[in-house]
Image: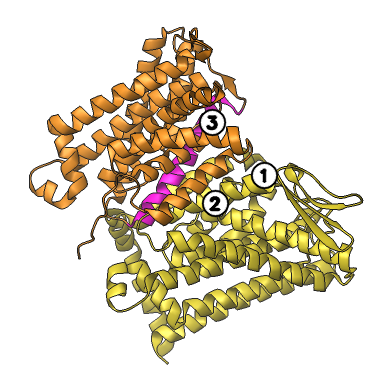
Chain colours: A yellow, B orange
């Protein structure tokens, strides 16, 4: 086993062990009721934001493109999930909540994935920062569209209408324009969120360490070089982008089915930036970092209420400083020369330990 | 008649987009970066003009000049503090920094001026409207279109004739070669930011004269649409920004009038996606070959 391979294995084991450990710890806390109410209410959202952060990291950190519409994909997933769940319950009488949740999440992921493919096709063949602006535009378009979308279910059939609410008699509204998706039966569970995180981690870590993942990273590091080695750049960028969109849609479905209503204003540009902050603070390309920062930054603002006014201000400063500190050659060399003696000392100690 | 009304409104809105788009396109052409914070510089400019008019009792022209001065300073400071250290970094890092800067400006404005929308005072810009037959054209519209034409001519002359303008074109063509020819690249980029930000202040005042609601997020949506306009016209091209801006404004107003009010923004952004599908370099952009 080569050193790189061993490091990767250790990294993956640590990532999974941390997530599974945290889940077991929280489950035991729930079992003996030592968990606070506010934290318990946040367990499902935390799972959603972790999935969002890891999937956005796939786009930003691994494939090196900036997506600013991640909340848009989440919203597609949330709405699809709410409609599917409502349809299954009202039209087919599916009472099994687990089955409904799973089908809703799968449908949400598929819908968001299709959206991702539709956007990716025109944009990912271009060079430059177009993906950022188009995904941003997409987020706004989605918000505009769901504002005038009406979906009802009657006699086992879904009725869609657009712009004006023209519904047949005796219809149960599922999506009611600017009021959002209404009368959702909350069926999301922490266990489902945990399973979704595991699926996300398996998908993303496997993709990153596969042949396709190496190709994606090659296109990030040098597009021209990768292209001349015969790597189909657009195809691999699409693969990363669509996977991330589908995962965001699944997180959205879980998030939507966690409360009784979903409104379009929940998925604004601000939410996309929130997820971006998770990714940047956790480290671009670092999956475990995304998991940790998404968890902490979801829990902390709830605990530090006084801080909430300045949250976005601090986030903005964090984005700027992290970028300057990690990318400016001068600051980097100063930092690494400051860190080098510590590293050397650590290594020396380790070697000493091995010989002893 | 309604058609003409809409057309004139579209031209007016489009002229504002065009002035904002100039800032985006110049910076993109020269520094090869998408300055996300540009939309928020507009908002700061509008707030400074607002303070000048409302609190300090300045005459309108002086208030606008003050806004331009503050924005120029702001633009140069942002460039020097946040973007210059990242000159060698990947475009992803610069873009994330620019987004951070955009949020920073919005939150600073939120702390200084609060979240409550302020109504922008009336000045000579929104004076009496002019009637031609049944058609009534507001004075803000006329000022906006006039300002747009003046800026367009001045900027074209500036880039074509002056030494600094030529330096800008050189840097946008090939930064390395320009540096070898003795052009101070950093100063040229600063100058670009200065001009773009001064124009942003004008755009802010014009925007708030036509749509007099001022809040910390005022600049972000017009900013994004203006960037769309810049891409539409061909990013990096000054006449392209003009044409793209005006066309986008007309499309937005017609879309709102004839298709759906709620979908106005969606239509504008759908245009962006269609443009990128059909002609990624925009209307006037030239395809650039990448050299290895």
User: Which corner quadrant of the image does residue A179 belong to?
Assistant: top right
Disc number placed over residue A138 in the picture, else none:
2
Residue B103 is one of the magenta-drawn residues: yes
The part of the image, by quadrant, that contains residue A213 is: bottom left
Instruction: Name above or below for residue B158 compared with residue A111.
Output: above
Q: Which residue is mark 1?
A: A265
Residue A52 place in picture, x, y as percent: 60, 62
The image position of residue B262, as x and y in percent, is: 64, 38
Observer-nearest of A104 and A35: A104
Q: Chain of mark 2?
A: A
- Residue that label 3 marks: B216
Q: Residue furthest left?
A: B181
- C-alpha gap between disc 3 and disc 2: 23 Å
Q: Which residues are magenta?
A: B90-115
State the residue in front, B279 or B234. B279
Q: Within the image, what quadrant is residue A326 found in? A: bottom left
């Amino acid at each position: 086993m080569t050193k790189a391979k061993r490091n990767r294995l250790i990294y993956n084991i640590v990532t999974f062990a941390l997530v599974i450990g945290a889940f077991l710890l929280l489950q035991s806390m729930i079992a003996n009721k030592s968990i606070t109410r506010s934290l318990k209410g946040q367990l499902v959202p935390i799972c959603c934001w972790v999935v969002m952060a890891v999937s956005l990291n796939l786009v930003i950190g691994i494939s090196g493109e900036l997506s600013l519409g991640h909340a848009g994909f989440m919203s597609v997933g949330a709405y699809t999930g709410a409609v599917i769940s409502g349809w299954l319950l009202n039209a087919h009488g599916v009472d099994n909540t687990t089955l409904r949740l799973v089908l809703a999440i799968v449908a949400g992921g598929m819908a968001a994935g299709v959206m991702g493919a539709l956007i990716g096709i025109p944009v990912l063949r271009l060079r430059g920062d177009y993906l950022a602006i188009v995904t941003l535009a997409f987020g706004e378009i989605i918000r505009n569209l769901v504002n005038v979308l009406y979906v009802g279910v009657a006699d086992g059939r879904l009725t869609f209408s657009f712009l004006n609410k023209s519904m047949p008699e005796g219809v149960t509204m599922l999506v009611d324009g600017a009021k959002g998706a209404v009368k959702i039966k909350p069926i999301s569970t922490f266990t489902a969120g945990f399973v979704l995180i595991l699926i996300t981690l398996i998908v993303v870590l496997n993709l990153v360490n596969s042949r396709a993942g190496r190709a994606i990273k090659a296109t990030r590091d040098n597009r021209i070089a990768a292209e001349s080695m015969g790597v189909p750049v657009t195809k691999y960028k699409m693969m990363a982008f669509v996977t991330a969109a589908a995962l965001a849609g699944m997180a959205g479905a879980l998030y939507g089915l966690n409360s009784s209503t979903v409104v379009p204003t929940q998925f604004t540009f601000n939410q996309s930036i929130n997820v971006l902050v998770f990714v940047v603070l956790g480290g671009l390309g670092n999956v475990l970092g995304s998991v940790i920062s998404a968890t902490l930054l979801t829990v902390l603002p709830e605990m530090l209420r006084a801080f909430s006014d300045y949250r976005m201000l601090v986030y903005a400063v964090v984005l700027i400083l992290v970028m300057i500190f990690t990318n400016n050659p001068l600051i980097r060399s100063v930092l690494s020369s400051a860190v080098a003696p510590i590293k050397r000392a650590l290594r020396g100690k380790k070697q000493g330990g091995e010989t002893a | 008649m309604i058609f003409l009304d809409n057309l004139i409104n579209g031209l007016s809105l489009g002229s504002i987009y065009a002035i904002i788009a100039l800032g985006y396109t110049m910076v993109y052409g020269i520094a090869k970066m998408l300055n996300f914070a540009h939309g928020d510089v507009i908002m700061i400019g509008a707030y400074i003009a607002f303070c000048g008019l409302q609190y300090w009792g300045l005459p309108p022209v002086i208030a606008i000049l003050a806004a331009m001065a503050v924005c120029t300073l702001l633009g140069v400071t942002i460039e020097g503090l946040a973007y210059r250290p990242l000159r060698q970094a990947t475009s992803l890092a610069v873009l994330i920094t620019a987004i951070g800067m955009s949020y920073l400006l919005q939150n600073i404005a939120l702390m200084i001026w609060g979240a409550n929308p302020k109504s922008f005072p009336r000045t000579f810009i929104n004076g009496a409207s002019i009637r031609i037959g049944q058609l009534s054209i507001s004075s803000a519209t006329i000022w906006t279109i006039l300002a747009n034409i003046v800026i367009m001519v001045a900027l074209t002359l500036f880039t074509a004739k002056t030494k600094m303008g030529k330096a800008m074109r050189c840097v946008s063509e090939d930064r390395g070669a320009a540096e070898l020819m003795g052009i101070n690249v950093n100063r040229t980029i600063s100058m670009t930011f200065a001009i773009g930000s001064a124009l942003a202040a004008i755009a802010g005042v014009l925007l708030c004269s036509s749509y007099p609601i001022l809040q910390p997020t005022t600049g972000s949506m017009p900013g994004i649409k203006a960037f769309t306009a810049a891409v539409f016209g061909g990013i990096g091209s000054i006449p392209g920004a003009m044409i793209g801006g005006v066309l986008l404004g007309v499309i937005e107003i017609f879309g709102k009038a004839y298709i759906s009010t709620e979908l106005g923004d969606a239509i504008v952004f759908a245009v962006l996606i269609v443009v990128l599908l059909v002609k990624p370099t925009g209307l006037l952009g030239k395809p650039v070959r990448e050299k290895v």
